[in-house]
Amino acid sequence: MKRSILINQAVSIAVVAFLTMSHSVAQTAPSSATGNDYSFNISTSQLWTDTGVDLQVGDVLNITASAANKCDPAGVADASNSGLPIADALPGALIAKLQAQGMPILIGSAKETNVDAAGHLFLGINAGDKPPCKGSFAVKIHRQAGTATSRGDVLKKQLEGAAQIFMAGQFGSGAATSATDTLTGGAAPAATVTPLKISSAPLDSTLRKDIDSLPRRVNDQFKNLGDTANFVLIGSEQQVQSALDAANWHVADTSDTKAVMGAILNTYDNKDYLTMPMSTLYMFGRRQDFGYEQAEPIAMVASRHHFRLWKTPVTWNGQPVWVGAGTHDIGFAKDQRNGSITHKIDPSVDGERENIGSSLQKTGKAKSMFYYLPPNPVQEAKNATGDGYHSDGRILVVFLQ
């Protein structure tokens, strides 16, 4: 029930925002005729810098960078290449992301790039834990504006959809299906999943027994069984947090009211809200130790990749073993326990398992990966709110470094 109340709060505030500010939203996008040249000083000591530049489909970016203090935007040949965001680019090179959760691209000294999805420009350094040199880059950007729908218009459409969903859920108007399509664009965008490099070696027999002893599913506060536990991480808490941070996973907010208001205010301020609050679920008789999520650009409350993570009672070779349950929210649906509104998940939960593994693999912080099919796999079930899901039952086991 807590999750449904949380979603009701979020959508209620979105409705109020839509009704009171919808006319001003469309004005937040930058004019195509002005403000298309930008200059930035990018420090090499900071992995990512938010430029504040919003991007639309069809934009063309011409980015140039010059060296400062012996730091070369093309990169440093003799520096460590451990844990780089772009493994095949030189350490210290200038890189960029065109969406908050987008894949980094190499910029170097100069690059022209086309924008194929609405987003937000971040500039960064291709570095692991330590920058290969100390200094900054002088970066100049010329943005040739496309003709696609403005960010404000997209947000207005999303809020209008949220209002329709809320009204349908509260008053039974029967418009929920079409409203969900309005809010999520008919279907949530799929994550870019790189094929996993799965080890062909057998998983350690002691670890297999430990995994066999773990719960197969999470439960809510009423002991209703829910999502399946579909991945395991092995590493210290610091290794886990470092790997997930490098993979652009964000810790979910814990203050519902603060988070929902932040969603409205940040999005109206042309920022992507990435830490929507997450409901509490249980394993080992306790709530999740961490909740992580990735949100598609400006999808405040509807669509996100997310998982909950618990530290288990077992260890392997002295390292903590963590178990997680990941699903992909793709819109809204009625909570079958009480008829209220809650998130609807993609029923093919193996896709989120692969997305989590792919995101960690790209960081270079995953030492090895294994699939393990336990003796009592979960292959067909329903989550705590009544949504059905299916899986091949395998658990992805990731050793971190």
Image: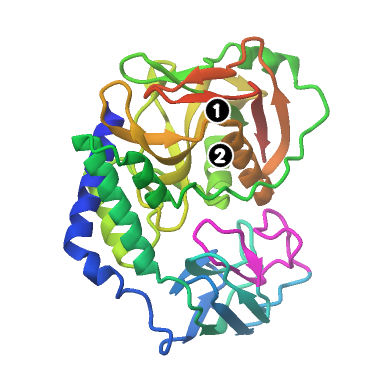
Residue farthest to the front, as pictured: 174
Disc ID at residue 322: 1
The amino acid type of the residue labelled 1 equals: Trp
Main SS, magenta region, reads: loop
Q: Point out residue 48 in the picture as x, y percentages from the top left corner.
A: 52, 65
Q: Count every numbered label the image shows and give the total.
A: 2
Does the magenta-highlighted stretch encompass residue 335?
no
Q: Could you tell which of marks 2 and 1 lies nearer the N-terminus?
A: 2
Q: Which residue is mark 2?
A: 240
**Dot 1 lies on which element?**
strand
Range covered by the magenta-colored residues: 78-106
Rounded to the nearest whole Å, what is the CA distance between mark 2 and mark 1?
9 Å
Does the magenta-highlighted stretch encompass residue 86?
yes
Crowd around label 2: few <14 · some 14–19 · many ≥20 (10 Å): many
Image quadrant holding the N terminus, namely top left
Q: Are marks 2 and 1 in contact (CB under 8 Å)?
A: yes
Residue found 52% across the figure and 36% down from its top: 237
The amino acid type of the residue labelled 2 equals: Val
Is 255 in front, or is 319? 255
Residue farthest to the right, as pictured: 200
385 over 245 or under it: above or below: above
Determine the image quadrant of residue 394: top right
Residue found 22% across the figure and 43% down from its top: 167
Q: Is residue 107 left or right of residue 272?
A: right
89 over 10 or under it: above or below: below
Residue 121 in sight here: yes
Q: Is residue 391 left or right of residue 369?
A: left
Q: Point out residue 142 in the picture as x, y percentages from the top left corner.
A: 54, 86
Determine the image quadrant of residue 62: bottom right
**Dot 2 lies on which element?**
helix
